[in-house]
Image: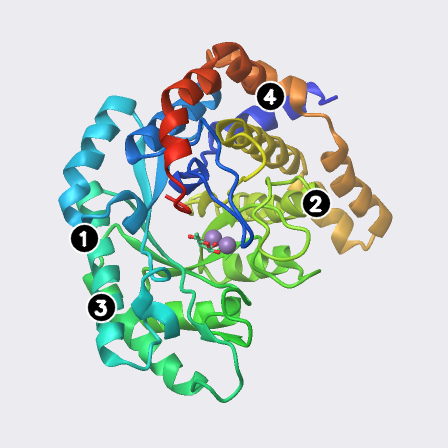
């Protein structure tokens, strides 16, 4: 149980904690082998906004919805008006704008790194359109993930592709508005299996730096090799002022996109500790963007999203319990076990009663998952959307 002084820390941390959810987390998705369609899955952008509004009604901390351009704004800037209408009818704002550079046939051999200049141009134009969409919607982040890479040694020039990529990101940076950030995401493999053009945080950092000061690195927790010390990467990026945001999810083997904290909650706690350390040292700095990037084939979409948000709050609150002054003192005098115990005790503290109280004080449901079940939302939307879901078998949005 948390002590009274802990409750104050927990409340202060939760008051500052907002998290973005992805539109694609509400749509039917599949594996390489098949797709299990859900009756309640969102079939259009209106339903994705409706689901996001329901998650926000239950948790109160998800004001924005990340959008993937081709899935959510297939007509590009012409769809901005439609999104604005949904913003005003649901109270959910458009969040990060994610270009789609990975599904069209032209991108078979890459997008911004494609050896064909015409394809590179098409990809860059799509990124620039995404910047314009972001400006029109007042969205802070344009979040770039490339599937570019190659499957066979010698089949592509890694060096020339670096040059093409730098050029494209520089041109994108020039187009950014003053309040926009370009996030550069990395991933070691998949869909490419020999080399990926932005494979790790060093490459992402160099590309971001070469692009300009409004470009930052995005850390997707599922995009690392087994046993990588992700919190150390986070610490470095914070130290360098280069951490733009997170895509949170959990994994056991690769980019599994499982529920945050379901496999290794201690790792997310350790990452949040680095965030709290930064806040303690430089309270004026804005927090990185906390975003969820998950897709559930087995769990109910809205239920899994609510579970994720609650888990994120629990882990963020636990990490806030570490007293940074005391920890620094113990570290400096090399009282190893005491330092470790301080760290671990925060992790093992049950913050759930304090979270319930925090929610009640703010007029939110004390137990968001139970409130979702009681609301009948999933049954109702399953009834409304079931037929459309049976009829459509397309992957993703
Ligand atoms: C990628 C990456 C991107 C996400 C796509 C759908 O693995 O995590 O962030 O936009 O999946
Ligand atoms: Mn991601
Ligand atoms: Mn991913």
Please tell me which residue lies in front, 240 or 375. Answer: 375
Q: Judging from the image, what secondary structure is the residue with disc 4 in?
A: helix
Q: Judging from the image, what secondary structure is the residue with disc 3 in?
A: helix
* Residue 146 location (% of width, % of height): 40, 64
Question: Which residue is identified by label 3?
Answer: 122
- Tell me: residue 390, above or below residue 108: above
Q: Confirm if mark 2 falls within 8 A of ligand 3.
A: no
* Residue 328 location (% of width, % of height): 70, 49
Name the disc covering residue 132, or none: 1
> Is 238 left, or right, of 265 in this rendering?
left
- Tell me: residue 280, above or below residue 391: below
Name the disc covering residue 264, or none: 2
Q: Work out whether mark 2 precedes mark 3 in sequence or the reverse, and give the earlier one.
A: 3
Q: Work out whether mark 4 precedes mark 2 in sequence or the reverse, and give the earlier one.
A: 2
For discs 4 and 1, the disc positioned in front in the rendered view: 1
Q: CA distance from mark 2 to mark 3?
A: 40 Å
For discs 2 and 3, the disc positioned in front in the rendered view: 3
Please tell me which residue lies in front, 23 or 287. Answer: 23
For discs 3 and 4, the disc positioned in front in the rendered view: 3
Residue at 52 percent of width and 82 percent of height: 152
């Amino acid at each position: 149980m948390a002590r009274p002084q802990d409750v104050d820390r927990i409340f202060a941390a939760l008051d500052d904690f907002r998290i973005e959810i992805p539109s694609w987390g509400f749509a039917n998705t599949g594996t390489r082998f098949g797709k299990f369609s859900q009756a309640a899955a969102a079939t259009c952008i209106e339903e994705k906004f409706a689901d996001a509004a329901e998650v926000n009604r239950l948790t109160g901390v998800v004001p924005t919805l990340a959008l993937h351009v081709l899935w959510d704004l297939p007509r590009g800037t012409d769809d901005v008006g439609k999104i604005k209408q949904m913003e005003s009818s649901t109270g959910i704002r458009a969040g990060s704008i994610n270009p789609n550079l990975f599904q069209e046939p032209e991108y078979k051999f890459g997008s911004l790194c494609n050896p064909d200049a015409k394809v590179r141009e098409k990809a860059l134009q799509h990124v620039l359109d995404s910047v314009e969409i972001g400006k029109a919607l007042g969205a802070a982040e344009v979040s770039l993930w490339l599937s570019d890479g190659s499957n066979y040694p010698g089949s592509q020039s890694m060096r020339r592709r670096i040059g093409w990529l730098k050029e494209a990101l520089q041109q994108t940076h020039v187009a950014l508005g003053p309040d926009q950030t370009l996030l550069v995401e990395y991933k070691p493999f998949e869909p490419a299996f020999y080399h990926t053009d932005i494979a790790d945080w060093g490459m992402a950092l160099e590309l971001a730096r070469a692009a300009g000061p409004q470009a930052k690195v995005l850390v997707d927790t599922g995009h690392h090799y087994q046993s990588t010390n992700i919190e150390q990467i986070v610490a470095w990026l914070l130290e360098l002022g280069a951490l733009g945001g997170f895509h949170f999810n959990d994994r056991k083997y690769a980019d599994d996109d499982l529920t945050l904290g379901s496999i290794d909650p201690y790792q997310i706690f350790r990452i949040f500790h680095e965030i709290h350390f930064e806040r303690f040292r430089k309270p004026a700095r804005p927090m990185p963007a906390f975003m969820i990037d998950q897709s559930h084939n087995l769990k109910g979409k809205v239920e899994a999203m609510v579970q994720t948000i609650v888990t994120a709050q629990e882990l963020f609150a636990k990490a806030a319990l570490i007293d940074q002054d005391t920890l620094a003192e113990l570290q400096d005098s090399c009282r190893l076990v005491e330092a470790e115990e301080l760290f671990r005790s925060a992790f093992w503290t049950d913050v759930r009663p304090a979270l319930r109280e925090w929610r009640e004080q703010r007029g939110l449901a004390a137990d968001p998952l139970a409130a979702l079940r009681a609301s009948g939302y999933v049954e109702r939307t399953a009834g409304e959307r079931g037929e459309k879901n049976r009829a459509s078998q397309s992957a993703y949005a």
